[in-house]
Amino acid sequence: MDYQAFFKSRLADLKHDGNYRVFIDLQRKRGNFPEAKWTSGESTKDVAIWCSNDYLGMGQHPKVLAALHEAVDRCGAGAGGTRNISGTTHDHVLLEAELADLHGKEAALVFTSGYVSNWAALGTLASQIPDCIVFSDSLNHASMIEGIRHSRAEKVIWKHNNLEDLEAKLRAADPAKPKLIAFESVYSMDGDIAPISQICDLADRFGAMTYLDEVHAVGLYGPRGGGIAEQEGVMDRLTVIEGTLGKAFGVVGGYIAASVELCDFVRSFASGFIFTTALPPAIAAAATASIRHLKESSVEREAHKAIVAKVRRRLDTLGIPHVDNPSHIIPVIVGNPAKCKFLSDTLLEDFGIYIQPINYPTVPKGTERLRITPSPVHTSGDVDRLVCALHSLWSQCQLARQPVAAE
Ligand code: PMP
């Protein structure tokens, strides 16, 4: 086989279908988030990032950076081993205690990313519990899908956020078999939120465990940043809460929070935990500082809510269509892959605004979008520039507007 020709032709297919991903070369500027320097060939340009998952700008927070620097000076760069071979440092122990407390659980277990947490924890639970059936929301993230697939457990997919469908599928399953319901709180592409409490009711009725991915909610919702489950007062009803340290907490890493026995079980059986080098202790220390700060301070959450509401209002007054949801994610629907890419390219090149286009297969065809994620550190000037640019490009691309709301 001509391997290089094969790679080339598959990449050409992606390009032809408009699904080829382009990574732009950015340097974030400490103290100036959301500003970054964009390098393209020989040229560089300042741009404003409007699609970051560092939702609160905590990746630049002085307390987080101070903790990171202090731990590097204290411990050096890496963990030096997997968790069971010298890689469990005091900073990991503190971080896990902080996370358990955040979610009101007995224990927590840290992984190298949110992806790995889902893959390893779901894969382990589903494969190690004999005859376990996993009930997976149809819009679950790839990391959950891959973990469930890897487990080879029986999988039942229920219609997204649809309680009737979940109930019917639970009822149809063998009552004697163990069950695990896997779902998310805030769904990342539409920003809609799961009916957590009612899903827990069904889990109770059918004797199922619950596994909730709060990756797009931790740090952002609840009085201490414990996520939607904390906001709704249902943390104690969930068997496992999974989250990331890489979005609102601004660092990197993932985790589960659950009972001592469940965490110990995953720790003991999950290859994705056992056989990989631990997060650097400095990252663990920075994450702990971020979580602690957001437990005590609602300032960032309040400012975040305010700017999200402001961007939505401004889009409404211009008739720019966006998904109406109760979260911080603003999906501006373009509905055409070429126009979506054109908008993203032109925003970047002509207006210095970076929003990655989201096309199929990440979202269904015909719902291509710009996923806007405002942060408390975007200024009023940033908002003005964003909405003015979208307004002018919307006309240039002859895109449909929704009825205009009064300001
Ligand atoms: N779960 C969901 C719902 C996600 O959207 C993502 C990543 N965007 C992950 C898990 C993985 O988290 P991480 O980026 O920390 O690997």
Image (tube, rainbow, N blue to C red):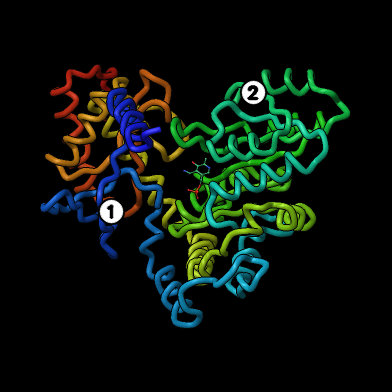
Sequence order check: which comes first, mark 1 or mark 2?
Answer: 1
Q: Which amino acid does label 1 sit on?
A: Pro
Residue extending farthest right: 176
Q: Identify the residue under disc 1.
A: 34
Position of 156 compared to 252: left or right? right
Where 7 sits versus 280, above or below?
above
Position of 51 compared to 292: left or right? left
Q: Identify the residue under disc 2.
A: 158
In this view of the protein, which residue sits in the foreground, 72 or 167? 72
Which SS class for mark 2?
strand
Quadrant in the rendering for residue 144: top right
Residue neighbourhood size for the residue with mark 2, other residues' Cα within 10 Å, grouped as few (<14), some (14–19), many (≥20): many
How many numbered marks have been drawn onto this rendered protein structure?
Answer: 2
Q: Could you tell me residue 107's position as x and y percent?
A: 71, 59
Kindly identify the residue that appears in the image at 34 percent across and 27 percent down. Answer: 322
Q: Which amino acid does label 2 sit on?
A: Trp
Residue extending farthest bottom: 74
Q: Quadrant of the N terminus?
A: top left
In this view of the protein, which residue sits in the foreground, 143 or 315? 143
Q: Could you tell me residue 131's position as x and y percent?
A: 81, 33
Kindly identify the residue that appears in the image at 73 percent across and 55 percent down. Answer: 263
Q: Does the rendering let one see residue 94?
A: no
Position of 129 compared to 141: left or right? right
In this view of the protein, which residue sits in the foreground, 209 or 359? 359
Q: In which quarter of the image is the C terminus?
A: top left
Quadrant in the rendering for residue 359: top left
Which SS class for mark 1?
loop
Kindly identify the residue that appears in the image at 36 percent across and 39 percent down. Answer: 309
In three-dimensional space, the C-alpha distance between marks 1 and 2, rounded to whole angstroms, equals: 38 Å
Residue neighbourhood size for the residue with mark 1, other residues' Cα within 10 Å, grouped as few (<14), some (14–19), many (≥20): many
